[in-house]
Amino acid sequence: HDEKITLSHGSGGKSTHNLIEGVFAPAFSNPLLDAMDDAATFRVDGTDDIDHRLAFTTDTYVVSPLFFPGGDIGKLAVHGTINDLAMAGATPLYLSVGFILEEGFPIVDLRRIVASMAQAAKEAGVAIVTGDTKVVQHGKADGVFINTAGIGLVRASWLMGQAQLEPGDKVLLSGPVGDHGIAIMFAREALDIESDVQSDTAPLHTLVASLIEAAGEGIHCLKDPTRGGVATSLNEMALGSEVSVALDEQSIPVHPEVRGACEILGLDPLTIANEGKLLAIVAPGVADTTLQAMHNHPLGRDAAIIGTIQAEPPGMVFLRTDIGGLRVLDMLVGDPLPRIC
Amino acid sequence: HDEKITLSHGSGGKSTHNLIEGVFAPAFSNPLLDAMDDAATFRVDGTDDIDHRLAFTTDTYVVSPLFFPGGDIGKLAVHGTINDLAMAGATPLYLSVGFILEEGFPIVDLRRIVASMAQAAKEAGVAIVTGDTKVVQHGKADGVFINTAGIGLVRASWLMGQAQLEPGDKVLLSGPVGDHGIAIMFAREALDIESDVQSDTAPLHTLVASLIEAAGEGIHCLKDPTRGGVATSLNEMALGSEVSVALDEQSIPVHPEVRGACEILGLDPLTIANEGKLLAIVAPGVADTTLQAMHNHPLGRDAAIIGTIQAEPPGMVFLRTDIGGLRVLDMLVGDPLPRIC
Ligand SMILES: Nc1ncnc2c1ncn2[C@@H]1O[C@H](COP(=O)(O)OP(=O)(O)OP(=O)(O)O)[C@@H](O)[C@H]1O
Ligand SMILES: Nc1ncnc2c1ncn2[C@@H]1O[C@H](COP(=O)(O)OP(=O)(O)OP(=O)(O)O)[C@@H](O)[C@H]1O
Ligand SMILES: [Mg+2]
Ligand SMILES: [Mg+2]
Ligand SMILES: [Mg+2]
Ligand SMILES: [Mg+2]
Ligand SMILES: [Mg+2]
Ligand SMILES: [Mg+2]
């Protein structure tokens, strides 16, 4: 009865999962929410028809620091919602923005963030069409928090999502993992390590469009492995489809600097947050075509096939390690890096 | 260059207006945002056709205290977004929720808020279909902040909004002003005044449906006068339509307790926030029908015709006072009541 919110509840890993499953999902339950995908998809006429669906999603951003190598909170807030729409196979159309400003926040910094959002929206071809602005007393927030919600038009005329994985499917990853989390970490801690690691924040909707073009309904699930990293995202899919995921550690791309930082800090790059990466779970027959389409896109140059979906044991992720062992890969437990996005 | 955000920037009055016009609107500018209505309305096929439009809106809630007579932050967050959709003539369909939780927040209080949101959504016939959960360190937020965004289907097959006012139009108000702001104030301050004032938070979409049924395209603009009150909302409309608004103070309903509190505290009830009230600006020919429709609805029993739209002087609001004088009624200046919603 005296349970309290902890930082782990915001990690995007196991505690977040348990909080959502234990508090939010049961109270709000409905078929669209229960799917627990990156975006809800529906027709506004309420029918179950699969074409002409809309996608709707939201994320709040509380990243610290507000400006970091490769981006800032504004860019993240625009890209993040575009990406959750893209993961539903949707073309992002319209965004809303909700600002919480702390009393005393410099307006010059606000202008910088707003300019960055405007540019990110313009580059991605989306319009910010509605907004809200609240202010709280000094000491009751931390500079700026931003919520974005977004609406998109679903292009996929088949069902995608974490319930659609099938044994035999291949797991593709669009590029190296851990850049965003490690970049934020370096920006925050005054670690005595030289680092060139930049956030990988990027809008993924054009990459998704080319995957859909290339592989069509062979694409069973798309997911951007943000908070909690690849490990958490794949565990959620394994649970959602009651299948198992077998990964090959050697095939997973990681930048050497990120790998080095993780070794020093005792972190697993597979639990570190990404912003401009996606996992695609595809039918075996289109795996090579999909990989080729990734390689042909600037945001998928280093893509790789990193694993396979298996029937048994349901709900688990395994990693065949570099040294030949097999270990269970859990969701992120605890929170190594609070306020990563 | 060293301008800072102040609490006034969150009042919903003149400073908020100036911040939006000076920082957000120019950077994000597009025709849908520029209308500056409570919700953006558009067709997802991108055409200008007026039927089958969607409405999209967002609000963030930072109200303090979280629980108050007549409601709580969760109820407010659901009703508020329903109402901004309703003001666009839309039937609310789907909501998103974004939570910012402060480390240490009691989960039992979170459950209470979530239950309240679930109930408010259920009663209004809307579904919460997507969400997000972030946590910040103790001292970096204030318990819980909630963003809701919403999508609705526009039922009005004509243009409504703050650019649609015409000289001769009548100004209707659905009930007494100032209840929400004064209820929050009493809940916050340990004032030595006995008070029964309750927040008027309520979902207005069924009231709007009956107004549309009764008056059709005679309805030129609907607006819920939340932060900044009736005075600010009417000033925004006067600017948006380049008309003038003439109000009759005697006709404006105010609960005696609210009037008394305002007198003691030196506040104008017309600048105090409301949550379950609406202003309707309607063609003169349908004014009585609209008033009748309000009176027939539980949320409009005390509705009144409170003023008239005039051509000159554009952009101003005038109040014919109880004692027969005429005074300019400005937007809310300063912020008597921070974090009212
Ligand atoms: N407070 C909440 N209420 C209802 N549903 C929620 C809530 N928080 C998250 N969800 C749902 O849980 C699922 C996972 O959400 P999560 O925020 O982890 O995904 P994401 O946005 O893809 O990741 P990230 O937030 O790291 O970008 C989604 O289906 C989301 O709609
Ligand atoms: N940060 C922002 N960026 C872009 N547009 C904004 C922003 N804040 C507010 N707006 C726009 O300004 C207008 C007024 O917003 P405001 O929040 O005052 O309206 P409201 O939601 O009806 O009132 P309240 O927030 O008190 O309920 C709306 O059209 C809204 O979309
Ligand atoms: Mg996602
Ligand atoms: Mg996301
Ligand atoms: Mg608002
Ligand atoms: Mg409004
Ligand atoms: Mg509002
Ligand atoms: Mg999220």
Image (cartoon, coloured by chain):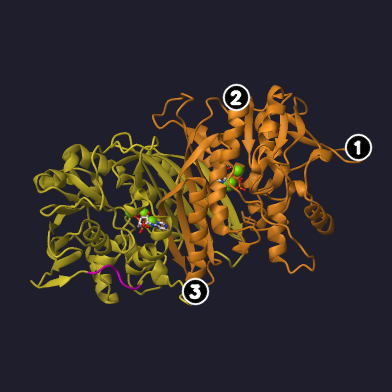
Chain colours: A yellow, B orange
Q: Position of residue B206 (x, y in %)?
A: 57, 39
The amino acid type, in three-letter code, at marker 1 is: Gly
Cβ at disc 1 under 8 Å from ligand 2: no
Ranked by sequence position, the earlier of labels 1 and 3 is 3
Residue A29 horizontal side relative to residue B20, left or right:
left
Ranked by sequence position, the earlier of labels 1 and 2 is 2
The amino acid type, in three-letter code, at marker 2 is: Glu
Q: Secondary structure at mark 3?
A: loop
In the picture of the structure, the residue carrying the numbered disc 2 is: B217
The stretch in magenta equals A330-334
**Tag 1: Cα neighbours inside 10 Å, few (<14), some, or many (≥20)?**
few
A155 is higher (above) or lower (below) than A8: above
**Residue B324 marker:** 1
**Residue B104 marker:** 3
Q: Are marks 2 and 3 in contact (CB under 8 Å)?
A: no
Q: Are marks 1 and 2 on the same chain?
A: yes
Q: Are marks 1 and 2 in contact (CB under 8 Å)?
A: no
Q: Secondary structure at mark 2?
A: helix
The amino acid type, in three-letter code, at marker 3 is: Gly
Ranked by sequence position, the earlier of labels 2 and 3 is 3
User: Marks 1 and 3, how far apart in space?
Assistant: 55 Å
Residue B124 horizontal side relative to residue B180, left or right:
left
**Tag 3: Cα neighbours inside 10 Å, few (<14), some, or many (≥20)?**
some
Extreme residue in the top direction: B285
Q: Quadrant of the C terminus of chain A?
A: bottom left
Q: Are marks 2 and 3 on the same chain?
A: yes
Q: Position of residue B100 (x, y in %)?
A: 48, 62
Q: Position of residue B177 (x, y in %)?
A: 73, 47
Q: Chain of mark 2?
A: B
Q: Chain of mark 3?
A: B
